[in-house]
Image (tube, rainbow, N blue to C red):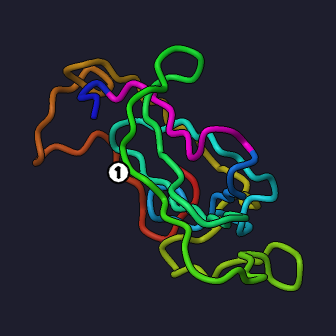
């Protein structure tokens, strides 16, 4: 884990064809459409990122999970995906296609909304918008159940 939040790569398998790997959630939040259409065996993450994937391997065995930077140092094995049991036609796709997961009200899709205002955020290593952290002083307040500022 990098305390500065720098990006690193997670590679599942030695090569792209080892297993089908489809992202289904990022940081414990479902994608808007599940699963990702394209199978990717390399994903970029930061130290605090999470990635949920659906994995289907065509043969039994151990598939290594590497950490590092693609093209530089993908040597560190962090885990193994163990593919065992009988072959099935299991798939994360519903009727051959993507599906839309249900969302609780606090995860409402805001993409169709039209913003009514904007608020700029500037961050450095010690402050946000020039204000040092104080849990009693808000940086900005927004009225509940309102999409604009």
Is 14 magenta? The answer is: yes
Vertical side of 122 occupied by 148: above or below: below
Between 39 and 81, the one lying in front of the other is: 81
Between 123 and 102, the one lying in front of the other is: 102
Q: Quadrant of residue 57?
A: bottom right
Residue 127 in the figure: left or right of residue 15: left
Residue at 52% of width from left, 80% of height from top? 105
Residue at 44% of width from left, 26% of height from top? 75
Which residue in the structure is indicated by mark 1?
141
Residue 133 in the figure: left or right of residue 87: left
Between 21 and 26, the one lying in front of the other is: 21
Is 129 magenta? The answer is: no
Residue 43 in the figure: left or right of residue 28: right
Q: Quadrant of residue 30?
A: bottom right
Residue at 62% of width from left, 64% of height from top? 55
Residue 31, percent across and down? 64, 63
């Amino acid at each position: 884990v990098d305390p500065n939040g720098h990006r690193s790569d997670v590679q599942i398998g030695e090569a792209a064809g080892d297993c089908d790997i489809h992202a289904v959630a990022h940081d414990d939040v479902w994608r808007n459409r599940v699963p990702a259409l394209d199978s990717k065996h390399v994903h970029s993450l930061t130290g605090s990122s999470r990635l949920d994937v659906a994995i289907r391997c065509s043969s039994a065995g151990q598939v290594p999970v590497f950490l590092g930077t693609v093209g530089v140092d993908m040597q560190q094995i962090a885990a193994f995906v163990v593919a065992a049991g009988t072959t099935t036609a299991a798939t994360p796709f519903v009727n051959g296609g993507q599906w839309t997961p249900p969302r609780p009200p606090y995860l409402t899709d805001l993409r169709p909304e039209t913003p009514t205002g904007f608020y700029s955020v500037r961050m450095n290593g010690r402050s946000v918008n020039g204000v040092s952290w104080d849990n009693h002083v808000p940086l900005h307040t927004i009225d509940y159940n309102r999409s604009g500022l």
